[in-house]
Image (cartoon, helix red, strand yellow):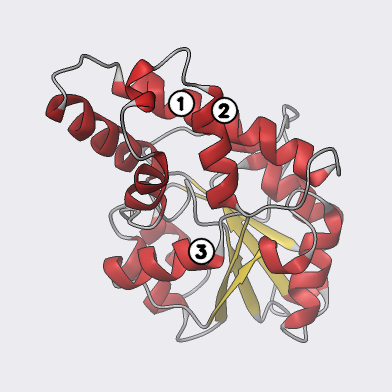
């Protein structure tokens, strides 16, 4: 792996803890209105509904929209299950959640360490504004942020990885995808990218894009500290 020059990080569910951020935001709104809600079930349902929409957009069955609009449409689809959503500003919920994502412990420090040896960028389905805002608030520093909203392809379409690496002037063999989602990594691996799986505290199977087979990755790290050690930083 000495040829690896660039690390491409997934962020939603890998660097940023979307689930607990979403749980806290919906619970706050429910408490304010005196309504009971299963905040974890809501977070999972929101994420799951968003990925249904993401798949339709990716395959051209819905118009091209960014992740904020996907999350907003997902909330609209959940109103029958969660009447609370009819009484709040849903776009405000989208932004208070996905533009203020909290990082997993150790992630910001690990990324700074990795930047001393590699070019470290984001490759995400989340929109650019949300990751700029979340990264700034969490003090996560990147060498660049690539959002699929500008690439014309959403992961796990192979063109997203190919175009992402080419924009950094790299061949796939000179790049490594880093993620907590095996489906994301398996797709990147198909293009010739190296891959690093990092274990995080919150499981996020919905972002595995249906990947069920046991794929062997170049690196399997127990946490961000272990990732740095295995990348010799």
Q: Is residue 143 visible?
A: yes
Residue 147 lies left or right of residue 204; in this view the side is right
Near-viewer residue (104 or 27)? 27
Closer to the observer: label 3 or label 1? 1
The quadrant of the picture occupied by the C terminus is bottom left
Question: At x 31% / y 38%, what residue is drawn?
Answer: 20
Q: Disc 1 to disc 2, how far (Cα)?
A: 6 Å
Q: Which mark is residue 48?
A: 2
Residue at mark 3 to residue at mark 2: CA–CA distance: 32 Å
Tally of numbered discs = 3
Local secondary structure at mark 1: helix
Q: Earlier in the sequence, mark 3 or mark 1?
A: 1
Does 97 sit left or right of 57 as displayed? left
Query: What element does badge 3 sit on?
Result: helix
In the rendered structure, find residue 230 and report the number of the disc placed on it.
3
Name the residue located 32 percent from the left edge and 56 percent from the top edge.
Answer: 100
Crowd class of label 1 (few under 14; some 14 to 19; many from 20; radius 10 Å): some
- Residue at position x 73%, y 52% from top? 155
Instruction: Report x, y in % for residue 62.
Output: 79, 41
Mark number, residue 44? 1
């Amino acid at each position: 792996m000495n040829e690896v020059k660039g690390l491409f990080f997934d962020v939603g569910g890998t660097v940023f803890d979307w689930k607990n951020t979403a749980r806290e935001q919906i619970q706050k709104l429910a408490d304010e209105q005196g309504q009971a809600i299963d905040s974890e079930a809501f977070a999972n349902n929101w994420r799951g509904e968003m990925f249904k929409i993401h798949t339709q957009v990716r395959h051209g069955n819905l118009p091209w929209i960014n992740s904020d609009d996907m999350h907003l449409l997902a909330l609209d689809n959940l109103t029958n299950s969660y009447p609370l959503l009819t009484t709040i500003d849903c776009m405000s919920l989208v932004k208070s959640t996905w533009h203020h994502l909290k990082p997993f412990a150790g992630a910001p420090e690990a990324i700074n360490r990795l930047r001393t040896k590699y070019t470290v960028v984001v490759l995400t389905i989340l929109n650019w504004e949300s990751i700029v805002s979340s990264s700034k608030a969490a003090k996560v520093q990147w060498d660049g942020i690539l959002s699929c909203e500008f690439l014309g392809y959403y992961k796990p379409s192979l063109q997203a990885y190919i175009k992402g690496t080419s924009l950094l002037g790299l061949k796939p063999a000179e790049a490594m995808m880093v993620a907590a989602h095996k489906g994301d990594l398996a797709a990147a691996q198909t293009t010739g990218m190296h891959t690093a799986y990092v274990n995080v505290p919150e499981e996020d199977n919905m972002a595995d894009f249906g990947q069920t087979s046991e794929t062997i990755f170049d690196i399997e790290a127990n946490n961000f500290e272990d990732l740095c050690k295995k990348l010799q930083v």
